[in-house]
Amino acid sequence: MSKKTDSAAEEEEKKAAAGQETEAVPAQEPEEEAPAPQPDAELEKAKQDAADYKDKWIRTAAEFENFRKRNAETRHTSYMEGRADVIIKVLPVGDNLERALLTCDEKTKKGIEMVLRSFKALLEGEGIEEINPVGEEFDPKECEAIMSEPAAEGVEPGYVKEVFLKGYKRGEKVLRFAQVKVTT
């Protein structure tokens, strides 16, 4: 007899001695264990599924992070290009101010110089620098040759002799090419 059956029999005897009715407790037979459906195989399958889901989750999270970074970079680039487009439209104002300096009286010259300093401070604040290659070797990455003249004696060909229109760049990106005269 099992321990459980022994204690049930003892309780019946106590109840009978106390004069109480006893219920017939059927003797419990030990249950036969049904063959388990291979818990190791199920566990391994569950572990494999969990690993697959975790791998998919990690990949999805990485793809989203990459998407977020690309999107942020695209937004930043678009913003900077938009700002550059506005600056390009304002550059002729600076050119005209410089031309005006050459033909005005002294009082007007002081006022134009103040406006021109503000204009150059704006460009500097935007990280834009002038391309003024006078005396330098012609660089087609920054300059546009609109005229040429034969080189004088002692002067090497392929150098910038005169700048007709200043160029501007931000970092390595040219916003406007300098228009120059080159020696040939």
Image (cartoon, helix red, strand yellow):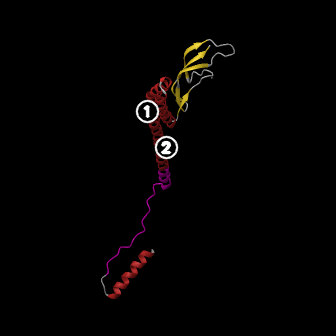
Instruction: Label 2, secondary structure: give it.
Output: helix
Q: Is residue 40 magenta?
A: yes
Residue 171 in the image: state x and y as whole percent: 55, 33
Query: How far apart are the alpha carbons under marks 2 and 1?
Result: 30 Å
Q: Amino acid at mark 1?
A: Gly
Q: Nearer the viewer, residue 148 or 7?
A: 148
**Mark 2 surroundings within 10 Å by alpha-carbon count, few (fewer than 14), some (14 through 19), many (20 or more):** few
Front residue of this view, candidates 102 and 155: 102
Q: Quadrant of residue 35?
A: bottom left
Among the 4 quarters of the image, the one containing residue 5: bottom left
The residue depicted at 53 percent of the width and 25 percent of the height is: 167
* The C terminus lies in quadrant: top right
Q: Position of residue 177 (x, y in %)?
A: 52, 23
Q: Position of residue 97 (x, y in %)?
A: 47, 27
The amino acid at mark 2 is Ala
Depicted 13 relative to depicted 25: above or below: below
| Extreme-left residue of the structure | 21
Q: Which residue is mark 2?
A: 62
The residue at the point 56 percent across, 24 percent down is 142
Q: Is residue 151 rendered to the left or right of residue 63?
A: right
Magenta-tinted stretch: 22-47
Q: Which quadrant: the N terminus?
A: bottom left
Residue corresponding to mark 1: 82
Name the secondary structure under disc 1. helix
Q: Is residue 45 above or below residue 79?
A: below
- Main SS class of the magenta portion in the image: loop
